[in-house]
Image (cartoon, rainbow, N blue to C red):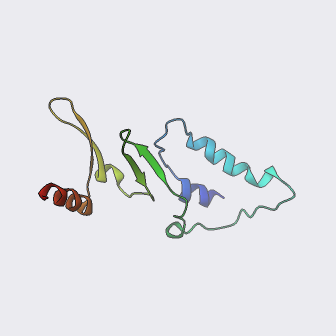
């Protein structure tokens, strides 16, 4: 169980500040004792690269645009950053070769 908490949840920092990770960990720890009729296997190992199917985080950027993260993004603070220019306009910058090419091609047309 502790392996799951360390590997799958770890020090995850949610985008929604209302989600308290320690509360989630507490609920996971209590799972084996919740329903005595259904046995709960506490001895398992998480294989992180196999557990991706349910990860999805949606961040509303504007009324027309949502940013969807389909899986955990390693070093996300260097991939997606907040930026504010000298006149106070705020942006979200995303490092992306494919995205750059798409928008650069649109600009050329």
- Give the farthest residue toward the left: 108
- Give the farthest residue toward the front: 109
Q: Nearer the viewer, residue 90 or 5?
A: 90
- Give the farthest residue toward the top: 87
Name above or below for residue 37 compared with residue 66.
below
Instruction: Report the residue at 59% width, 55% height from top.
Output: 5
| Side of 58 relative to 99 (left or right) | right
Name above or below for residue 33 compared with residue 49.
above
Instruction: Report the residue at 60% width, 60% height from top.
Output: 3
Q: Quadrant of residue 54?
A: bottom right
Instruction: Report the residue at 14% width, 31% height from top.
Output: 86
Position of the C terminus, as image quadrant, is: bottom left
| Side of 89 relative to 47 (left or right) | left
Q: Nearer the viewer, residue 79 or 8?
A: 79
Task: Give the image location of residue 99, x and y in percent.
Answer: 26, 59
Total marks shown come to 0
Task: Give the image location of residue 106, x and y in percent.
Answer: 19, 57
Instruction: Report the residue at 83% width, 53% height from top.
Output: 35
Q: Quadrant of residue 4?
A: bottom right
Task: Give the image location of residue 72, x and y in percent.
Answer: 44, 57
| Side of 105 relative to 76 (left or right) | left
Q: Quadrant of residue 83?
A: top left
| Side of 98 relative to 86 (left or right) | right
Q: Nearer the viewer, residue 87 or 30?
A: 87
Position of the N terminus, as image quadrant, is: bottom right
């Amino acid at each position: 169980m502790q392996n799951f908490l360390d590997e799958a949840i770890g020090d995850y920092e949610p985008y929604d500040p209302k989600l308290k990770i320690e509360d989630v960990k507490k609920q996971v720890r209590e799972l084996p004792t919740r329903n005595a009729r259904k046995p709960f296997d506490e001895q398992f190992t998480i294989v992180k690269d196999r557990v991706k199917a349910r990860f999805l985080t949606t961040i509303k950027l504007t009324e027309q645009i949502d940013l969807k993260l389909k899986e955990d993004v390693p070093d996300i603070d260097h991939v997606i950053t907040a930026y504010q220019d000298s006149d106070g306009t705020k942006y979200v910058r995303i490092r992306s070769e494919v995205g750059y090419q798409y928008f650069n091609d649109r600009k050329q047309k």
